[in-house]
Image: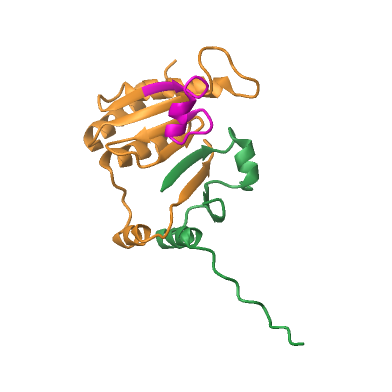
Amino acid sequence: MRTDIVEANEFPDLAQRYNVYAVPKTVINGTEEVVGAVPEPTFVQAVASAAAPPAAHPPDRILLP
Amino acid sequence: MAFLNEQDAGFVRKRLAAEMVHDVRLVFFAPSTGGLALPGEDWEMAEYTRQILKELSGLSERLIMEEHSMVSEPGLAKEYGVDRAPAIAIVGAEDHGVRFYGMPGGYEFVTLLELILDVSKGRTPLSPDTLEALANLPSDVHLQVFVTPT
């Protein structure tokens, strides 16, 4: 696990890339986001979700001929 | 110029003395060396960061500051996974992958202090459930925590 604390004002390119409007905001693997302070289990859930292999999306509906 | 007044310095010195377990290296990467700034880089923030770290490392024998340059030591920066500056790698008995990008001023000074103490202890106050969940993650995780000093 790598943890970067990023001072948003000094790195506006990163802040902009991840739409940081409020702090603290945590971006996990560049995909999942947690804004503000949240209970530990909620945070763990976000981390687990970011680390999980992408789920195969089932088709929304099956088109019948 | 001192960043910490005497009272704050005393408080920090006490906490470091009471809570540090392993030595911690504050591996600082400046954007460039000397007074020569590359276009687009904020030399002032880097210089303040350097001064804060210098002052902080003077408060405990267990805190060791190293000064490096992104420009003249790109290989070392890469070794630490540091891709922008000012950056601080906070390294204890092991490298837990903790990096601080930007100036640790204002409220973020406390963030840096807590990071140092956690790294020095080599553990965090996370619950057993959390530790188990993290140990079972299928892949590596990169956290980017955005903060501001105010």
Among the chains, which one is orange? Answer: B
A58 in relation to B104, above or below = below
Q: Residue at x 25, y 24 (%)?
A: B61
Q: Quadrant of residue A14?
A: top right
In terms of image quadrants, where is residue A45?
bottom left
Q: Identify the residue shown where x is 57% and y is 13%.
A: B36
Tell me, yes or no, whether the highlighted magenta stretch contains residue A29.
no
Q: Position of residue B88 (x, y in %)?
A: 43, 31
Q: Quadrant of the N terminus of chain B?
A: top left
Work out whether residue A29 or residue B2 is closer to the camera in this orientation and state it: A29
Is any part of residue B107 visible from this angle? no
Check residue B68 for magenta coloring.
yes
Judged from this view, the residue extending furthest toward the bottom is: A65
Against A52, is B111 above or below? Answer: above
Q: Is residue B50 left or right of residue B113?
A: right
- The one nearer the camera, B127 or B133, is B133
The coloring applied to the image is: by chain
* Residue toward you, B27 or B57: B27
Please give left or right for residue B113 compared with residue B104 in the image: left
Magenta range: B66-87
| Count of numbered marks | 0
In percent of width and height, residue B41 lies at: 60, 24
In the rendered image, residue B20, in percent from the top left (x then y), is placed at 25, 35
Q: In the rendered image of this protein, does residue A24 appear above or below residue B53?
A: below
**Residue farthest along the top direction in this orientation:** B35
Write down which chain is painted green: A
Res. B119 visible in picture: yes
